[in-house]
Every structure is written in C-alpha cells, then in structure tokens.
C-alpha cells in the first residue's frame, strides 16, 4: 500500500498513528474503542439490573401501582414516552390507574 493510501487516525493528536485507509482508527485505537463500548454496555446492563431489583423491592413492599410510580419519581412526560414506545407491560387496570394519576384518562 502506498503512503497516499494511509490516513491519520481519528485520534492522531493523541496517538500519532495512521490507519490502513479503510478504518477511522489505527489498530491500537480500534481496540481501545472496542474496550470502551464493552465497558459502556456492561454499565448499561448493571444499571438495568439495579432498576429491576428496585422494582422488585417496590413490588414486594405491597405498594399500589400509583404508589410505586410515585416512589420512582416517574413524571407524566416519561409515562407518555413509555406508552408511545410500547414499553409498558401492565394490565389494563394498572395502566388505567396511571393514566388517571397522570390526568390522562382518555389516553389510548
């Protein structure tokens, strides 16, 4: 490969290397980017696990759906987003109680 085919790594100012012309990052920086993504994914999964355990704890305490949502600090705009994205796995009765709580009784 000729020198013209090589391009500076996106991290050139910190690594000082060149790529093969097809990648944005040199080999060392690609490995670092991959490590960072793996760390971010691990943190995201850990956060999700924490949230599920918090939900379990709230459910175990015997709170109503409205009390649980209040304890979470969920606000109307977040509830609307959950509904719009289809992420709410509640029965119709619980969903109706929350729609009333958030003053959206006619929300479908």
Image (cartoon, rainbow, N blue to C red):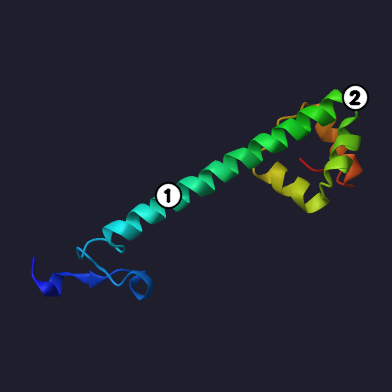
- Gap between marks 2 and 1 measured at Cα: 41 Å
Asked which quadrant contains residue 67, the reply is top right
In this rendered view, identify the residue nearer to me: 15 or 50: 15
105 lies above or below 65: below
Secondary structure, mark 2, is: loop
Where does the image place residue 29, in percent across and percent down from the top left? 34, 60
Whether residue 52 appears in this view of the structure is yes
In this rendered view, identify the residue nearer to me: 17 or 51: 17
Secondary structure, mark 1, is: helix
The image quadrant where one finds the N terminus is bottom left
- Please rate how many residues cluster around mark 2, counting C-alpha atoms within 10 Å: few if below 14, some from 14 to 19, many from 20: few
Q: Label for residue 35?
A: 1
8 lies above or below 20: below
Residue position for label 2:
62
Q: Which sits earlier in the primary sequence, circle 2 or circle 1?
A: 1
Residue shown at 65%/34% (left/top)? 49
């Amino acid at each position: 490969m000729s020198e013209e085919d090589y391009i500076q790594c996106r991290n050139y100012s910190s690594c000082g290397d060149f790529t093969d012309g097809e990648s944005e990052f040199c080999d060392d920086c690609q490995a670092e980017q991959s490590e960072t993504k793996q760390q971010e994914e691990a943190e995201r999964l850990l956060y999700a696990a924490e949230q599920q355990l918090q939900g379990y704890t709230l459910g175990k305490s015997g709170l109503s759906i409205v009390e649980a949502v209040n304890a979470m600090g969920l606000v109307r705009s977040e509830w609307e987003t959950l509904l719009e994205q289809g992420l709410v796995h509640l029965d119709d009765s619980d969903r109706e109680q929350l729609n009333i709580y958030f003053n959206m009784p006619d929300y479908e």
